[in-house]
Amino acid sequence: MLTSNVTITIVAIGALGTAVTLVDLGGIGGDDTKPPKAAAAGLSTNDMLANLTSSSDMDKVAADAIAHAKKRAYEEHQRELKRLREKAKRDAAARAKLKAQQERERLAKSNPSAAQNKAYGKKMNALKGWDRCWPSLLTLWNHESGWNERAVNPSSGAYGIPQALPGSKLASAGPDWRTSSPTQIAWGLGYIKARYKDPCGAWAWWQAHNWY
């Protein structure tokens, strides 16, 4: 009987050791980089339903609080965008104003005086062979523009020393027609020659009609 009990005990211990060994070997040999079978297979419809029903629905007060917070965040974002857009407009306007002021100052420094423009006119008139008509040209453009290369007639829009109408007609004498006195004078002398032969004829016409 004793021998039988010992034999049973030894067999039981051996079986237990084998079981432990199998468990350890399974743990050691497994690939822990792979997800569990249940996760790899994805959630079933029942699993998803279980997740939906396992937690209680959100309280309406809590949901409203979240919605209000989202609304405040959105409105604050819109206010910030508006502020940035307005700042950009102000900055652009300030830059444009500064640029215009700098351009006016640059032109003021580079602009010839009326006396310089008259000197250009006298020389160019002489080159045309119209020395005798210089007094007529001087008086004519004194009346028209005061020999100001940026003179603009507020009624008609006529522009420059010879008061071309429209001012863009001066472009035929050069691309710098808006600011160049010699370019404007060259155009004016060409106009006078084509229509009145010389400044003497142009001034005579002006005296009779107050335009030329």
Image (cartoon, rainbow, N blue to C red):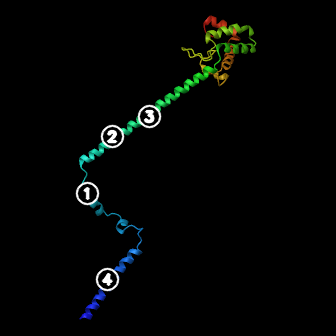
Residue at label 1?
55
Q: Residue at x 67, y 12 (%)?
A: 115
* Amino acid carrying mark 3 in the image: Arg
Residue 37 is drawn in which quadrant? bottom left
Marks 2 and 4, how far apart at CA: 66 Å
CA distance separating discs 4 and 3: 79 Å
Q: Secondary structure at mark 2?
A: helix
Foreground: 166 or 99?
Answer: 99
In contact (CB < 8 Å): disc 2 and disc 3:
no
Q: Residues within 10 Å of mark 2 (few under 14, many from 20)?
A: few
* Residue 36 sits in quarter: bottom left
Gap in angstroms between the C-alphas marked 2 and 3 = 20 Å
Q: In this view of the protein, which residue sits in the foreground, 26 or 17?
A: 17
First reached walking from the N terminus: tag 1 or tag 3: 1
Q: Nearer the viewer, residue 208 or 145?
A: 145
The amino acid on which the numbered mark 1 sits, given as a three-letter code, is: Ser
Q: Which residue is mark 2?
A: 72
Marks 2 and 1 sit apart, C-alpha to C-alpha, by 28 Å
**Does the residue at mark 4 contact the one at mark 1 (Cβ under 8 Å)?**
no
Q: Depth-wise, is mark 4 or mark 3 nearer the camera?
A: 4
Tell me if residue 79 comes above or below residue 43 in the rendering: above
Q: CA distance from mark 4 to mark 1?
A: 43 Å
Residue 2 screen position, x and y as percent: 25, 93
Looking at marks 2 and 4 on the same chain, the residue that comes earlier in the sequence is marked by 4
What percent of the width, then of the height, locates residue 3?
A: 27, 94
- Look at mark 4 in the image and give the residue it sits on: 16
- Tell me, yes or no, whether the two marked residues, 4 and 3, touch with CB atoms within 8 Å: no
Picture layout, residue 128 above or below residue 171: above
* Residue at the spot 38% in from the left edge and 74% down from the top edge: 27
Would you name the residue on which mark 3 appears?
85
